[in-house]
Image (spheres, rainbow, N blue to C red):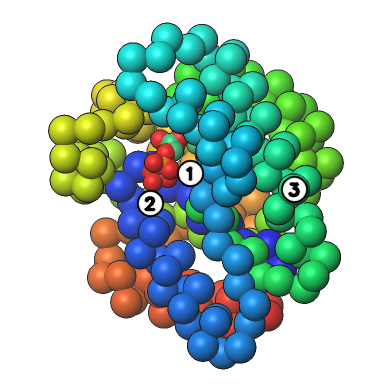
Amino acid sequence: MFITFEGIDGSGKTTQINKLSERLTNLGYNVLTLREPGGNVISEKIRETLLSAGNDITPCAELLLFVASRAQLVEKVIRPALLQGKLVICDRYIDSSVAYQGYGRGIPIEDILICNKIATRNLVPKITFFLDLPPIIASVRAINRSAENLDRIEQEGEIFFDKARQGYIQISKNEPERFIMLNGSENPDLIHKNIWNYISKII
Ligand code: TYD
């Protein structure tokens, strides 16, 4: 089964992914956790290009690099793991491109979806958890985490992250069955309990 997590930078995805993966592993599930962009040698190289502060990348090139990284990850890692019966939990996936490159940068959503369809050959997560948090709170967390070394995308201002957040909110309206919106400002244990309610029904 393929599960993904989404949210703007600093929304608490890592904490929730760790809690979920630990719980599933303790129950005997074979869990593989991944992050995007990354998760294999080529995608980590693309990640370096995408996130290095100071790289001047056009919105279109940015989209295509994220999508190239995803294509490599899906074919080399995610599909083989799913075929082996593993539970794959990925930190970000197509919805990040829709929220950041679509709503954030203004690239038409249809174009984003076409590229991603090619890259993933239609691999869609069974369920996606979106941790919603106002950018002003999330950015404080992201800044605390990264100290002074904010990456190229973290350096974007609040307006950009607010657009991305609105994108996520729109996806949750369009796909309420798959895309579960959770309040990221709640206590992490409570958020996990909520997530577990969904997961325990589908595994
Ligand atoms: P990362 O350090 O992994 O951020 P986080 O811990 O918040 O997930 O960096 C990934 C950055 O790339 C993050 O700012 C979101 C952005 N991103 C996109 O803009 N589009 C995408 O398709 C993906 C996967 C990530």
Residue 43, position in %: x, y?
Answer: 60, 37
Quarter holding the C terminus is bottom right
- Indicate left or right for 68 with 16 as reference: right
- Which quadrant would residue 46 be assigned to in this image? top right
Can residue 109 be spotted in the picture? Answer: no
- CA gap, disc 3 and disc 1: 31 Å
Q: Quadrant of ligand 1?
A: top left
Q: Which-is-in-front pick, marks 2 and 3? A: 3
**Residue shown at the point (81%, 32%) measured from the top left:** 118
Check contact, mark 3 vs mark 1: CB within 8 A.
Answer: no
**Residue shown at the point (60%, 24%) measured from the top left:** 65
In the drawing, what numbered circle is on residue 76?
A: 3
Characterize the local packing of mark 2: few (<14), some (14-19) or many (20 or more) Cα atoms within 10 angstroms.
many
SS at circle 2: strand
Which residue type carries mark 2?
A: Asp
SS at circle 1: helix
SS at circle 3: helix
**Residue shown at the point (76%, 27%) measured from the top left:** 114
Say which residue label 2 marks: 132
**Residue shown at the point (52%, 14%) measured from the top left:** 59
In the drawing, what numbered circle is on residue 20?
A: none
Vertical relation: 156 (above or below) 183:
above
Vertical relation: 70 (above or below) 60:
below
- Indicate left or right for 101 with 131 as reference: right
Say which residue label 1 marks: 169
